[in-house]
Image (cartoon, coloured by chain):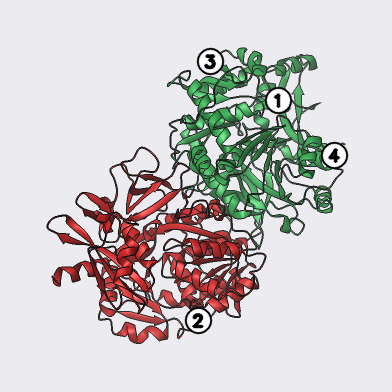
Chain colours: A red, B green
Amino acid sequence: MDNWLQKRTQLTPQRLALSFHEQTWTFQDLQQQVNGLCATLQSRLSKHGRVAILGNNTPKLYFGILALHQLGEPIVCLNKHLTAPELQYQIADAQVQTILTTQKFLPQLQAVANVKQLIALDQLKWQPQANWPAQPTELDALASIMYTSGTTGRPKGVCQSYRNHWTSALGAELNLPVTESDCWICAVPLYHISGLSIVMRSLLYGMPVRLYEHFDPQAINQDLVHGRGTIISVVPYMLKKLLAKKHEPYDNHFSYMLLGGGAIDQATLDQCDHHQIPVIQSYGMTETASQVVALNPADAQRKLGSVGKPLFPVSLKIANTKQSNQIGEILLKGDNLTPGYLNQPQRLTEKTTATGWFRTGDLGYVDDEGFLYVKSRLAELIISGGENIYPHEIEQLLNQLPGVQESAVVGKTDATWGSIPVAFLVTDQSYSLTKVQKFLMDKLAKYKFPKELHLVNHLPKTANGKLQRVELVKWLETNE
Amino acid sequence: MDNWLQKRTQLTPQRLALSFHEQTWTFQDLQQQVNGLCATLQSRLSKHGRVAILGNNTPKLYFGILALHQLGEPIVCLNKHLTAPELQYQIADAQVQTILTTQKFLPQLQAVANVKQLIALDQLKWQPQANWPAQPTELDALASIMYTSGTTGRPKGVCQSYRNHWTSALGAELNLPVTESDCWICAVPLYHISGLSIVMRSLLYGMPVRLYEHFDPQAINQDLVHGRGTIISVVPYMLKKLLAKKHEPYDNHFSYMLLGGGAIDQATLDQCDHHQIPVIQSYGMTETASQVVALNPADAQRKLGSVGKPLFPVSLKIANTKQSNQIGEILLKGDNLTPGYLNQPQRLTEKTTATGWFRTGDLGYVDDEGFLYVKSRLAELIISGGENIYPHEIEQLLNQLPGVQESAVVGKTDATWGSIPVAFLVTDQSYSLTKVQKFLMDKLAKYKFPKELHLVNHLPKTANGKLQRVELVKWLETNE
């Protein structure tokens, strides 16, 4: 296939491609910037090592991503929140030779032992130029590598091919078409699949992206009010913040919010309805190159708690079940599924069934109408006396209690029951143990009752803000 | 991938899928009809022979197409205008065992020597049923076979894979998104790629199709006026008829006409502008599974004579040229290109360059902005009312007639049909017009019949003895 940026520029050169504060670039402007950057970068890139990106969502990082694509280089996406040892591991694992970044991150990166070459894109000078002999886009070539932590072991580099991105973008388009009047606000990180998938969609759909360096709810609300953006990717935290800061109705052209990274609660959903904000709840992961299951706004109230139906190119089934409504592991198949983990081919084999289905490690069920409900991560399943306990279910209850800010439930080894559920709570002054017990009493089967409650100041989390249950399990083991 | 109809039904069961006169079917209704038909057909289909369809655009033929897909059977698309000898050849070539048709065509088909089983869908009884174990859609499997004649020899069966149809539909969607409020009018034959591609788009987009048994400009205009259709595929002949019969403005939701099968003239384009009818002119062929190049309405006046730019998944170049505006053979690459010709693998090899580009046989150039202009059909194809006519096929027959020493067939511009076939004959005394007509009658589909016969002393040729068709075309133009 032709190089995607070049193809898009040939098709719609004058269409808006990118905006950032008051600056704008058409696809032709973008192409010229990227061509110029390619010319400057080419001689500096080694043929022996990979190239990574690390930084905030800035136009220069955006150009950098497209320049790497045009140079035929897979993009290693590094999380800016990582510590030096975490970065060191990923740089070694992905054989990164060069990191494209900005001045701001130089001190942090210079402290990492195995960094070979740092290029601060905001210090680099280049001239926009009309032509560049771009590499064609080979659909099965490696486009990007993103690390996921998983629940155990070292982070794994998830390989994403261009076919993964292509299938993902087209699956989304078949679900809810993006039209010429749409503009996608990108305030999620470009180094996450949530952000990178917006860049890919922009090229394929010919759609402008409004880029945000940081999540700024006031400014974004203003954009949505004045029609400077019509679609936005959010996680629950962002959605709530936008609602809290919203004082004016959004523009008539406002289309929807695409919600990933967790379920939405009834109160928030009601608020969205009240404000006439369509929300597409979705399910996906780095291994699936963005959303694979989506719940359209029309079904949101009727199917509360569901993440929707699998997109057109995606096949989904629940392992070892023959009827709807039975819980089992969620299995996926389709061209948006990763071809594998970097340097760990056995990992994908482990995660794939004999007939080629990808094991997500998540538990869920599909109702009679084909809507998926994600019940819990298989990796977190607590089996106590033969009964399955899903931490999420208990946490949701605990979080409703006055005085409880956050909670986490994990399994603790138990001589009698195999494992017992144990809760960690971040609380404030209004917390009372009696209330907890009273509250849970009639809501939870006894075997699901947390057998211990630990009050803590904060919960252990990864740089991405993902709860590290394994740390809590470790703490329990060493503090007996 | 999941079976397309089943997937679509799971996603949007209640959405309108098909309408015909006053009858309508949701995707769920359609699914149940198709399931029932599958159950009835399965035992009747041989495992050794292929299944063909032949008939008018009726709902039952529509069900038949989808049932074959669901049974994992490639669909051999037979043109209802073909004569017995023409059908006999294609049936033998494609090893057709069974033909799905309707009562109306039984006499015509019973006269074909090698027909083994005829099933009249309008005589067949079946019960709609909820479930059927459909075959998954393997993207690289053979979906359909359509015959084209080409310049030399016998008609060739063009193989179309599901990947061809998938890529074609998505390329069109990336060009001009079809939204939930659209409905596509299908008055072009289902056995042509123009019609079959509408069926495929319907499944992939979740879009209703309004089916017409015959092209009925008054009724279609009424549909467009009252919003019962928003998009329609037309050939120039149909577009002109619609304009001629149009007395009221089309509904606000009217989207566009997709024009294939030949260029549009300035006067017609002006009329479309006057009536605010957006027209997408396009270029494509059976081998490319519908349009590969499209001219959007916004560029239509500025780029008169162009067929537009290659769709996103399609790569296009002009052979042996280095600059824009130079004429050469149009070469194509992309996943919508046929994997080959049935029983004639060498034919595709002949048509493909060393680097994998498909040689269309058409001459054209690309201007500075990337717009394609088709200058001439290298293969001298005559397109008459949307049907492809290959002069060679007619000439071969004419040359068999006693009294005919040589013949040449060319297209003559025609206000109604776009082009009509006209024959030039070099004859001797034994020639008789009556014999010609009698001879051709049962051998040649009516649309291929030469509408004029010119007796000449010799045919214009180059020094090498190569026929100069262009001289005959010029003669026709100056002798009207």
Residue drawn at x 76%, y 36% as measured from the top left: B419
| For residue B99, above or below residue B66 | above
Q: What chain is tagged by disc 2?
A: A
- In the rendered structure, the answer to whether residue A174 lies left or right of residue B272 reads left
Q: Nearer the viewer, mark 4 or mark 1?
A: 4
Query: In this rendering, does residue A341 appear at all?
Result: yes
**Separation (CA) of disc 2 from disc 1:** 67 Å
Secondary element under disc 3, as helix, strand or loop, is: strand
Residue drawn at x 13%, y 70% as measured from the top left: A480
**Sequence order check, earlier mark of 3 and 1:** 3
> Which residue carries the number 4 mark?
B245
| For residue B91, above or below residue B194 | above
**Separation (CA) of disc 3 from disc 4:** 42 Å
Q: What chain is tagged by disc 1?
A: B
Query: In this rendering, does residue A6 appear at all?
Result: no
- In the rendered structure, the answer to whether residue A454 lies left or right of residue B408 reads left
**Sequence order check, earlier mark of 3 and 4:** 3
> Which residue carries the number 3 mark?
B117
> Which residue carries the number 1 mark?
B406
Q: Amino acid at mark 2?
A: Trp
Q: Are marks 3 and 1 on the same chain?
A: yes
Q: Residues within 10 Å of mark 1 (few under 14, many from 20)?
A: some
Q: Amino acid at mark 4?
A: Lys
Please identify the quarter of the rendering in which residue A288 is found: bottom left
Q: Nearer the viewer, mark 2 or mark 4?
A: 4
Report x, y in % for residue A114: 26, 78
- The reply to whether discs 2 and 3 touch (Cβ–Cβ < 8 Å) is no
